[in-house]
Amino acid sequence: MTIRKKLIVSTIAASVAATAFAGLPLSNKGLAEKLGFNATAYAATAAFPSTDIVEYVNDLRAALVATSGLDEVQALRTVIQGLGTDDLKYVAQPITSKVTTKLGAEFNGTDRQAVEDLVLDVISITYDPNLTELEIIRNKDAYRSVLAELAVGAGFTPQQVDDLTVDDVAEYFFTLQEKVAGLLNGLSAAELLAALNDAEARAALIEDAFEALSAESLIVQDIFEAYGIGKADLTTVVSRAQEKVDNTVVIKAATALYGAYLKMNESTGGPGGGAIGGGEETTVEVPKEVTAFIDDFKKKLAAATDAEKAALIAQAIQQAQTLVTKLSNFDLSSNVTVSNGQAALQVSGSSVLSAIAGIGEILKNVKELAAGVPVPPVVLNINLGNVAQNDVNIGLNNAVIQEAIKAGLSGINLTVSGLSATLPVGGQFNGAVDFKINKSKADSTTTGGLQAASDVYSFGLAIGGKAVTSFAQPIIVSVPLGNVDGVDKELLSLAKIVDGKLVFQGGSIRGNTIVEQRDTFSSYVVVENKVTFTDIKSVEAWAGRAIQVIAAKGAIEGKKAGVFAPKDNVTRAEFAKMLTRALDLDNSLATENFADVKDTDWSAPYIGAAAKLGIIQGRSATKFDPNAQITRAEMATMIARALKITKGAQDVADVNAALANFKDASSIGAALKAGVAFASKNEIVIGNNGKFSPNASATRAEAAVMIYRAVNFK
């Protein structure tokens, strides 16, 4: 590990330990071992904190939810981060003054400001379930540079600095917690409350912890001592921080955390007994109205005759849908906090968990008691209302995600200021979620001169503390449109901004929004995409509009600028791309196993996506034949399968009757008849002169018309 990387981690951890004992996990033995640290130096390239720490913090948050203490802790962190610059400088002064005194006039200007900023950043860290703010501080170049100078100023030799590892940091960080835990361990809740109400007693408690710590032989402790930073200075920092915060807020937060630590370790006989990541499963209470509904339904069903049961089940299904709708909608606008120009919401409350558990209980009983009755997918809706800030951070803690998976929810929809994103649950989405949104104005530079119909939205996603940019389970994004007066709405497309250029993704207009499934995240803007071709005059009357719209969506492209080649035939690979792009079925992570399709081929992700969904099949188990011309029957079948997935289309009840008017119906392959029947009945693929011509190829103009009709299928 380099000097700078070791020092930034060590100094941050030491500073955090010095700011507020109320925010530290209390434990009393084996702390470093529990976090997975051993005698081997932690790799410089590894993320800090480790996934074990993230999991532990998530367990802590679950315990806070179980003991109804999360809001109190969040309130304290929000108040601390909301302190003004002067207040924060006042809080940090005992540390910054000692550093500047030792290093003298040479340590002024940028260097001194960097030290002050570092201390202020650490003090104002919010209660972050994934500890991402520590990672941000760790990676600031200004902090890395100045900390190298601090090491020299502390009198450390290069070898001493090189020997400093995260093990030393963990030892200092958690030994301090040991001391605090030891002092608190003998206090009852009432005694703890009394101590917190007395500022002098509280300061004495903190000073005693630092006094006990100073007796330990710790390398990080030596860094502080080199600058003359002692227990009085560190105690003053903590006391000043608490001085700037309403004491009631401090009391509630500290008491809530203490109760949560007891909850986490109640099965092991006290704080510190349980291993990180092995927290108990939180029991979530099902709403009483759900229990009452299910019990009533069961009693009525048990007493009903066979003739009465069908009507009873139908009535219960309606009641269940009403109750699920009620439980699945949350207006959390009043819970949104604002700090440093950013709006934030952490979804973790017991009311949300209880509602999810209630939905799960309803779905489970409906499936058991009304077997065979289709249960529609259920999405939990979280509404943040309208916010004035351009940056919004939304967190879904691990307990919420796990409860949603257990309940069988299909997704969690997050809505803020007209924008919404529906995140799937389960699979890749199996841990705490952090979802970030940035909004900015679109200008001609961004849109390449095209008419913008929305702001620019940039998205960021982390799952379990790890950044994710591609996902096999798509996220449904609904982007609000701006002023669209004079705009051809059918030509609107959501465009991904890649290296300053637009990549058109399509999207469906729903009211005053455009909806699109995304399997990758970046920056997006909605534009009116007017694509002009000079060679479509011969097909303009019957295919012109379809070509224009499908091209605008990015589902079909010209052979070159201005050239569409409407009479060229379509290959199987080309149609796979057209259909998956037009019907929003892209999946950049999908793979295929055909020997004649290379992973590097342009068509591979589209063939993979279509094959994974069962929309397209190979000519054999190992051969796709991507460059072969696609037949009309194959196109009809692919469209039918895709519409069943995207729009819930149903197969034709009587396939033979639907094909009876075609003279060549007998030449349609058995596996393709259902698809042809669907496409012809719904006038997506139309026959000519009493024939369907199933084995004939199709032109690019014909393909555009078919896809246009599929997009508009209802």
Image: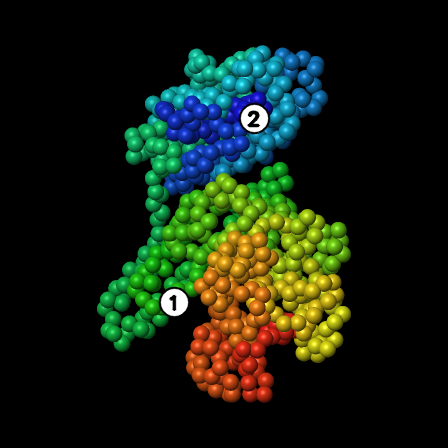
Give x and y (percent) for residue 492. Answer: 67, 63
> Which of the two residues, 562 or 466, is positioned nearer the viewer here?
562
* Residue at 43% across, 27% down: 37
Give x and y (percent) for residue 200. Answer: 47, 19
The C terminus, quarter of image: bottom right
The N terminus, quarter of image: top right
Closer mark to the observer between disc 1 and disc 2: 2
* Residue at 37% across, 52% down: 406
* Residue at 76% across, 70% down: 534
Q: Which residue in the protein does label 1 denote?
A: 374
Q: Is residue 199 visible?
A: no
Q: Give above or below for 311 relative to 91.
A: below
Residue 290: image quadrant is bottom left
Q: Give above or below for 95 relative to 120.
A: above
Q: Is residue 462 visible?
A: yes
Does label 1 or label 2 sit earlier along the sequence?
2
Say what secondary structure mark 2 lies in: helix
Q: Which residue in the protein does label 2 denote?
A: 5
> Which of the two residues, 595 or 584, is positioned nearer the viewer here?
595
Q: Give above or below for 624 relative to 89.
A: below
* Residue at 44% across, 61% down: 377
Which three-letter amino acid code belongs to the residue tagged 2?
Answer: Lys
1 sits left or right of 293 in the view = right
317 sits left or right of 644 in the view = left
CB contact under 8 Å: marks 1 and 2: no
Which disc is residue 713 wearing? none
Give x and y (percent) for residue 408. Answer: 39, 56
Which three-letter amino acid code belongs to the residue tagged 1?
Answer: Pro
**Mark 1 → mark 2, Cα distance in angstroms:** 56 Å
Give x and y (percent) for residue 8. Answer: 56, 25
> Which of the two residues, 211 or 617, is positioned nearer the viewer here?
617
